[in-house]
Image (cartoon, rainbow, N blue to C red):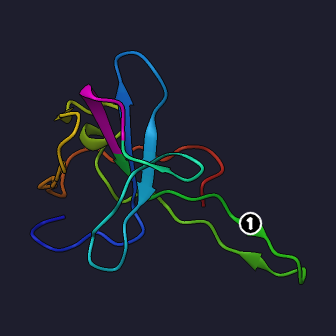
Amino acid sequence: MDGKPLPRAFVVFIPTGGRPAAAETDANGKYVLEFSAGRKGAIPGKNRIEINTARQSEGNADGSVTPGVKESVPAKYNRNSTLEFDVVEGKTNIADFKLESGGKVIQEAGTY
């Protein structure tokens, strides 16, 4: 975002018909989509893309709590996303998205 990698963001490819594929970005903003357990990739064709960073707080096995994280990505890239990517079957598809901060950020209830 703003020319820098966006670590720990969720990237979701939502096809017009079928199951979404998702991944979490690494420290360098890189990701590999997972369609289902052990299956990488996404459904070929046009996919709507949503990118977000919000996380709910979680209880850990030791009784501690990992705090949630507020959304930092503007709604134009998630809830109101117009981002699209055409996945081509049989090809190594590389989908980079140039995100800019600014604009309305929508906080979902219970994510922080």
Residue name at image x 54 percent, y 44 percent: 108
Q: Position of residue 18 (x, y in %)?
A: 46, 21
The answer to which quarter of the image holds residue 20 is top left
Which segment is the magenta one? 42-50
Q: Position of residue 24 (x, y in %)?
A: 43, 61
Task: Look at the picture and state if 105 lies above or below 69.
Answer: above
Which of the image's four quarters has the N terminus? bottom left
Q: Position of residue 89 (x, y in %)?
A: 23, 33
Residue 44 colored in magenta in the image = yes
Q: Nearer the viewer, residue 8 or 40?
A: 40
The answer to which quarter of the image holds residue 111 is bottom right
Q: Position of residue 23 (x, y in %)?
A: 43, 55
Q: Nearer the viewer, residue 84 or 46?
A: 46
Residue 46 colored in magenta in the image = yes
- The local crowd at label 1, few if under 14, some if 14 to 19, many if 20 or more residues have their Cα within 10 Å, is some
Q: How many marks?
A: 1
> Label 1 belongs to which residue?
58
Looking at numbered disc 1 in the image, what kind of residue is underneath it? Glu
Residue name at image x 39 percent, y 61 percent: 9
Q: What SS does tag 1 mark?
A: strand
Assign the magenta stretch its main secondary structure: strand
Residue name at image x 88 percent, y 77 percent: 61
Which of the image's four quarters has the C terminus? bottom right
